[in-house]
Image: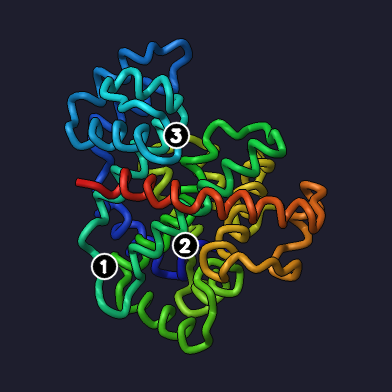
Amino acid sequence: MQPFPSGAHEAVLKRIRDIPSLPDVVNKILAVISQPNTPASEIARLISYDPGLTSKVLRMVNSAAYGFQRQISSIQHGIMILGFNNVRGLVLSASIFKLFEGHAHPGGLNHKQFWEHSLGTAVAARLIAKTLRVPEADDIFSAAMLHDIGKVVLDVYFKQQYENVLQTARSQQMPLHGNPFYQLEQAQMGMNHTGIGSYLAAKWKLPLTITEVIQYHHQPQLAENCPALVHLVALANELAVLQYEKGGVYEREHFSESLLEYFNLGDEDLQEFLTLLEDDMHSAHDLLNSISSK
């Protein structure tokens, strides 16, 4: 399936090229984090150049999600507590949040709810990965947080077309985070958030693990490089929708059987995930505040 409408490929790519690049300091931080044996002091030095990122890292490590009794005031100490992968997720998410901040418009995507779902999926994915000891989970927070980033791009850069898609979905009371909505995007626009998102990930030179999650989380069977991670985020997406948008009431039919078979999960496993995810709701709210704070 072509990610863009026939005959409109160049026009679409031009709009994507108009999207700002990630700030230089962010690219430097991501490059350093990806190198083996990088000391926390070097990452702390780079982050300290950006007061906004510094405050976000400290706010995150001092949030209820980590539950420390005393205040952490050292950026290097905060990085060591969070771990490099969580820091990468925070830096990426906070920077991308800032790029699209202020672009919400009436009739368009609710950006607050979008980021709440994204973070809910990230929290659920981290929970599932820890419980199931899934390999390839180093980028789990970043990948899950950014899995739907193409929706924001469509909302901001294809405003009227995407408003029409959202209007159709709302009139049909269709959730915005499942396969039916993904198919609706393709039917009405000739493209969808996974295609747009994966092109953007390539523009930003994001790791292959994150790019593949963005591209295939609605078709995890097509993932070639990190299938376990893509299946995990796809399942976390469904879990987050059930917990955050449907009150956490367990419904077996809500989950894709192919995902449950992939991880060999039964009803008791899913209900346990929901219980644990409910316990994480307050900490997830704190994490979102740390990402979106000025």
Q: Quadrant of residue 290?
A: top left
Inter-mark Cα distance, 2 to 3: 32 Å
State the residue in front, 88 or 81: 81
Q: Amino acid at mark 1?
A: Ala
Choose mark 1 or mark 3, whichever is in front: 3
Q: Is residue 198 visible?
A: no
Where is 20 relative to 77, above or below? below
Q: Which residue is mark 3?
A: 66
Across and down, in percent, residue 291 comes to 32, 45
Question: Who's the residue at 17% across and 32% down the image?
Answer: 51
Across and down, in percent, residue 166 comes to 42, 79
State the residue in front, 66 or 83: 66
Helix, strand or loop for disc 1: loop
- The quarter of the image holding the N terminus is bottom right
Across and down, in percent, residue 274 comes to 64, 56
Is residue 3 found left or right of 110 in the rendered image? right
How many circles with numbers are drawn on the protein? 3
